[in-house]
Image (cartoon, helix red, strand yellow):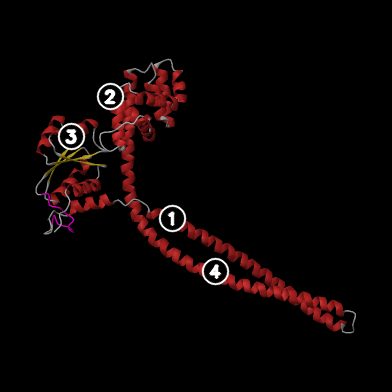
Amino acid sequence: MYHCSVIGTCATLVELRQIARKYRIECDGPVTDYMLHCTFVSSAQEQSAPIRHLNKLLDKKYSRQIRLFARADSEEALKTLWRKAVQDGNIAGAYWSLITHPLCSEALFQPVFGEVHMLSHLSGASIRTDLREMATLRKNLNEKTDENAQYVCRLQERIADLEGEIRSLQEEVLQARVLKADLSAANARVANLESHSRVTQLEAVSENLAENLFTTSERMRTLEQKFQQSELQRIAADEERCRLQIVVKEKDGELSILEDVLADWLRSEPGNPCSGQGQRGCPFKDLNGQRILYVGGRSGQYPSLRALVEKNNGELMCHDGGLEESRLHLNAVLSRADVVFCPLNCVSHDAYYRVKRYCDRFDKKLVLIPHASLSSFSKGLHDAFPVSSP
């Protein structure tokens, strides 16, 4: 009864697929992650080659933890090692080492199994919290996208202005260098004329040229500093623009929570089928009062699913697959249904196989959808009941 927990916790889907390919394991239907998991769980009690391979793989993968647990000579020592592993987050290796230890009794394993089971629930709750936070982030993203677009526009205008200033400064630097070259040539001519009678006059000219040279040198130094500052500003602006482009690209790729919008719409709008229902171009299709059975999923989604079916002129029956409702009641609702829907990621192994065997036996239409979500259910309705051409 613990095979599902052990395989799901200790082995990755990549490892299971590698073993399945090596031993050419075939699943009943498409080889989805869920079907692959179910196949290994259902055959775990058999001493088959794939299961032996999986055992060897886990022994090798968690050899360090197995050696650590092997030093324990009592159940209390095993409990201490388990608590330390939970604190460190090393659940998978410790779980496998504990369940394969010869001193692991039923009394010791039961609370450990419950703890691992509840950790999987906490993980699911965390994902749902992340989805709600993502809706808020999406709203903030739209606001920030507009702000970023305006900022990028202003930044591009500033970059264009800086590039114009840089070109002007470059021209001034070139002119200053020409003036400096002219002054150097003039100083050379003055040196050649020092021995002549015009020395005094030339000295005055030289002093004037020296002052001009000093002024020009200071101007050139100032221009070079401005040029360096402008270049640094341009580089900083380019880096900021690249950063903003990356932020905008990442934000544009975030998940849009369309299901929450559709669920709110279904709850707020009463069902009034349009005159063109069941025809191409109409969002609703006429189910002609057919009974649809939804097995598994999350009970909190049932009202939204029922509203969607009723808007399409159908009737929805829901069964949780045996969590709270009787498994015997499942056969009763199956006999009343025209079409059966089953979300693969949120239904027990037992309920799935019971539904599949019943539909195969009585030739009843079974629609398998990948997720327990409103969008997957809506797509399943669309595929199961295609809209006829007008």
Mark 3–mark 4 distance (CA, rounded to whole Å): 70 Å
Measure the C-alpha gap from mark 3 to mark 2. 21 Å
Proximity of marks 3 and 1: CB atoms separated by less than 8 Å: no
Q: Inspect the image, locate mark 3, and give the three-letter code of the amino acid beneath it.
A: Val
Read off the residue under disc 4. 162
Q: Which residue is mark 3?
A: 355
Q: Tell me if 292 is positioned left or right of 94 in this view.
A: left
Q: Earlier in the sequence, mark 3 or mark 2?
A: 2
The residues bearing labels 3 and 1 have C-alpha atoms spaced at a distance of 47 Å
Whole-percent x and y of residue 335?
A: 10, 36
Span colored in magenta: 277-287
Mark closer to the chain start, 2 or 1:
2
- Name the dominant secondary structure of the magenta segment: loop
In the image, is residue 186 part of the stretch drawn in magenta? no
Q: Residues within 10 Å of mark 1 (few under 14, many from 20)?
A: some
Residue on which the image places disc 2: 1
